[in-house]
Image (tube, rainbow, N blue to C red):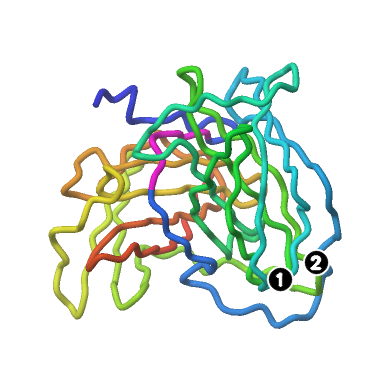
Amino acid sequence: MSAGARVASFGALLVAIFALAVLAGRALDPASEAADGAGHTAPAHGGAHEAASATTGAALRLVADSPTTLVPGRRARLTFRVVDEHGATVRDFETEQARRMHLIVVRRDLRRFQHLHPAQDAAGAWTVALTLPDAGVYHAFADFRSGGARHTPGVDLFAAGRFEPLALPAPSNHAATDGYDVSLRDDVTTLRFSVAREGKLVTGLQPYLGAGGHLVVLRAGDLAYGHVHPANEDELVFATDELQPGRYRLFLQFRHADRVHTAAFTKMVAP
């Protein structure tokens, strides 16, 4: 794979887009704690909502056909379509990393995270089972390739109720998840992760949907979005452009012992 195909552009909107795959099905940021139920109230919205693609110059939009307000903790079905500039439903999507559509759902305080794979029906609409674990405003990124181009349109989702946004953990190069200890080494243009368990380095990570691991990068505030895969399937080494100043949440996904695990990191990039 060429560097141009592996390295995404982290510009004003940090659109680092590579092949996206890994069904994690995790409703909670593994480094998070439960909200205390006090504070702000999530707005109540419903009906059809739409958002333009984040891909520069793209005219595709995401239109939600199911309500975008969900009851916290209750399983629901989210149905949406991708439409072109004329409002026609897009039906043709390219298979990449064994999937034609990937959906990243994150609460706007970056403390809740899910990676899902919707199914398309004969009319071109996509449906996925979804649970928003607690109150707040979430954003769903539809990540797909169509017409030879990468697109990431999105839509806000709402879990009505009282909530208090959680502060991000302090920046750290270490994270724990499911009994694994994950370390990060950063050399500006490369992010290198290692996984240990019970003090021993884990080798032989299992590939999942054609990739050795996956990294979703989100910037606090504007939710600038990027997603990359490792250059080498045997190592969790991700090539990226230099990140713009800001606070980021990194969600690393890897597979071991026949399970997908998610480790979350906070990273600060100084001006």
Give x and y (percent) for residue 140. 63, 48
Q: Is residue 51 left or right of residue 113?
A: right
3D distance between C-alphas at marks 2 and 1: 7 Å
Is 153 inside the magenta-drawn segment? no
Q: Is residue 191 above or below residue 110?
A: above
Q: Is residue 92 above or below residue 230?
A: above
Q: Residue at x 37, y 37 (%)?
A: 240
Q: Quadrant of residue 261?
A: bottom left
Main SS class of the magenta portion in the image:
loop
Give x and y (percent) for residue 236. 25, 50
**Residue at label 1?**
72
Give x and y (percent) for residue 172. 41, 65
**Residue at label 2?**
160
Q: Earlier in the sequence, mark 2 or mark 1?
A: 1
Q: Amino acid at mark 2?
A: Ala
Q: Residue at x 64, y 31 (%)?
A: 82
- Contact, mark 2 vs mark 1 (Cβ under 8 Å): yes
Q: Residue at x 28, y 51 (%)?
A: 208
Label 2 Cα neighbours within 10 Å, binned few <14 / some 14-19 / many ≥20:
some
Q: Secondary structure at mark 2?
A: loop
Q: Amino acid at mark 1?
A: Pro
User: Which residues are the magenta region?
Assistant: 15-21
Nearer to the camera, 181 or 17 = 17
Q: Secondary structure at mark 1?
A: loop
